[in-house]
Amino acid sequence: MHPLYSRNAAASMVWAALLLAPLLTAPAFCSEPIPPRARDLGIPFAGTAGPLNAITDVAAVEVGHATLTRGEGPLVAETWDGFLNDIYGQHVHEEDVFHALDSATGGPVPEGNVGGGTGMRTFEFSGGIGTASRSVDTPFGRFTLGVLVQSNFGMRAELRMAGVPLGAEITDLLPQTGAVEKPGGNSIVAIIATDTPLIPTQLRRLARRATLALGRVGSNGHGGSGDIFLAFSTANRMTAYWGKEINHLSMLPDMDPLFEATVQATEEAIINALVAGKTMTGVDGNTVHALPHERVRQILRKYNRLESAP
């Protein structure tokens, strides 16, 4: 059991990348060992991942974390985490946001119940932060695409993993309500980063492909789901205003390989968030449970979908 505390504050600025690219912030501070990831359990995925299998595989992209715990309850984030959190307490302050920005680094990205992901649920299991990446080969060279999600959506019966109806197989371990019944909320934030040269209209098309990954894991797109998908490119650096030379804008003509990479990496990032999630107890004694790793392996084996762990 991993208790949460009511004034736990985290600056949930995962979408700041569009304003500060190449700086991406998905706040949280985690000193605990890095939990296993989806591939460690033998869950199969299509596509070639980057060295870290994280959004930080895109050169110059950094992720910053700033989780502050004060009092009794979980954290505040853009996605609705009111089942566990004192969500209307307005506990995130300016200094928390700047700490996340100032602490941003490259390298491995903590996942699960960290920062803005601490109070999140995914398919009624513990959810939160997840990331993944893909190497993309094109006639014009190899590029990298990475995704970071703050995952907080889905009902248990919908959950599919590697095509397996996992939610229908695991019908227990549902969220437990404590002293006060609270309505559910559904939403996800996904940030897509790439070093591929793209123009704004292409990035808009890329962001829309993230919804296909939600379908792959079983989501039907609930009416109360406030989903946000944003994409940015670190290419096409230009001199603003009165530069001393003419700017030249380039763009990849065929986006199909990037569309495929976006769907693949977003799907894996969501599953990574699920795998990393811990059992969490928050405000009013409300509890969400961790995904049971060994049961997942047994179910995938039953459907002949389990790969040998690396």
Image (spheres, helix red, strand yellow):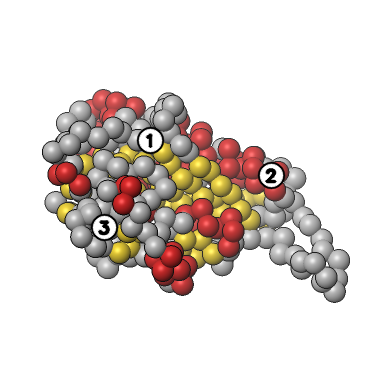
| Viewer-side residue, 12 vs 38 | 12
Q: Secondary structure at mark 2?
A: helix
**275 horizontally vs 72: left or right:** right
How far from the left and from the top, in percent, is residue 242? 83, 70
Sequence-first disc among 3 and 1: 3
- The residue sitting at 85% across, 74% down in the picture is 244
| Mark 2 vs mark 3: in front | 3
How far from the left and from the top, in percent, is residue 145? 56, 53
| Viewer-side residue, 34 vs 67 | 67
Q: Which residue is mark 1?
A: 186
Quarter of the rendering containing residue 224: top left
Q: Secondary structure at mark 3?
A: loop
| Viewer-side residue, 50 vs 19 | 19
Q: Which residue is mark 2?
A: 202
Q: Amino acid at mark 3?
A: Arg
Is residue 199 something that shows in the picture? yes
- The residue sitting at 67% across, 49% down in the picture is 138
Real-space Cα distance between discs 3 and 1? 22 Å
| Mark 3 vs mark 1: in front | 3
| Mark 2 vs mark 1: in front | 1
Q: Verify CB contact (< 8 Å) between mark 2 and mark 1.
A: no
Quarter of the rendering containing residue 271: top left
How far from the left and from the top, in percent, is residue 168? 26, 25
Disc 3 packing (10 Å; few <14; some 14–19; many ≥20): many
- The residue sitting at 14% across, 51% down in the picture is 1
- The residue sitting at 25% across, 35% down in the picture is 182
Is residue 35 something that shows in the picture? no
